[in-house]
Image: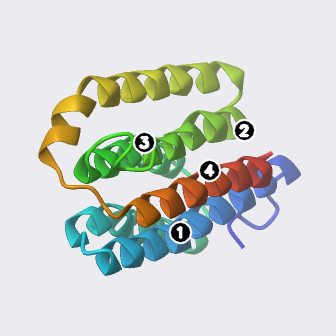
Amino acid sequence: MAAKPGARDDDRLASGLFLLVTASGAVAGLLWAIAYALLGRPLSGAVPGAFAVVAALVGLRLMRSRELGRLRELILLLILLLPAVLQASLGGYVKGSAVVMWSFLAPLSALVFFGPRAGWAWLAGFVAVTAVSALVDAPLARSIPPLSYSAQTALFVFNLCGVGSSVTLVL
């Protein structure tokens, strides 16, 4: 469905896995966008909502063109950066229920799609993103009101289970 007819098995597998990751991300982004809107944070919800739209468009383009091109890098860059943006919009690590942990899927996916060397490079990006998030955490925590304690706790659980499930899916 995502690879050209007659493509090698490895290419078909890579295209299919990328399509699965992209489609799953689009659905998850839409659900997170709705959840944050319902929690009274529509601007925060726009972050995963934007990812959902881009991921859906990328998936459709892949199915139509059957060419991966730079689509994987685009999606990985969004996976790396947007959780940190979302976390910042919510007030940092605790108030954002450590949503930046979703960024770890970028180096993991790079490892699967491109191999160990790329995985290490994307891991360095993940470390940088989490470090920058730590540097801006205190001012954000002071300036942005928290979600309810029960919402923060539920989002921690969803983030932990979601990342754990995604790691299992990708591997």
Which residue corresponds to the image point at 55% horizontal and 74% vertical from the top-left?
64
Q: How far apart are marks 3 and 4 (CA)?
A: 21 Å
Identify whether 154 is placed above or below 167: below
**Going by the picture, which residue comes out furthest to the left?**
143
Dot 3 or dot 2, earlier in sequence:
3
Quadrant of residue 171 within the rendered picture: top right
Quadrant in the picture for residue 118:
top right
- Amino acid type at image mark 4: Leu
Residue 160 marker: 4
Label of residue 112 in the image: 2
Image quarter in which the N terminus is found = bottom right
Q: Residues within 10 Å of mark 4 (few under 14, many from 20)?
A: some
Q: What element carries label 1?
A: helix
Which label is found at residue 28? Answer: 1
Q: Tell me the number on the disc at residue 147.
A: none
Left or right: where 169 falls relative to 62: right
Is 35 displayed left or right of 170 in the figure?
left
Q: Which of marks 4 and 2 is nearer the N terminus?
A: 2
Mark closer to the chain start, 3 or 1: 1
Cβ–Cβ below 8 Å for labels 1 and 2? Answer: no
Q: Measured from the top left, where is residue 154 in percent x and y? A: 52, 63
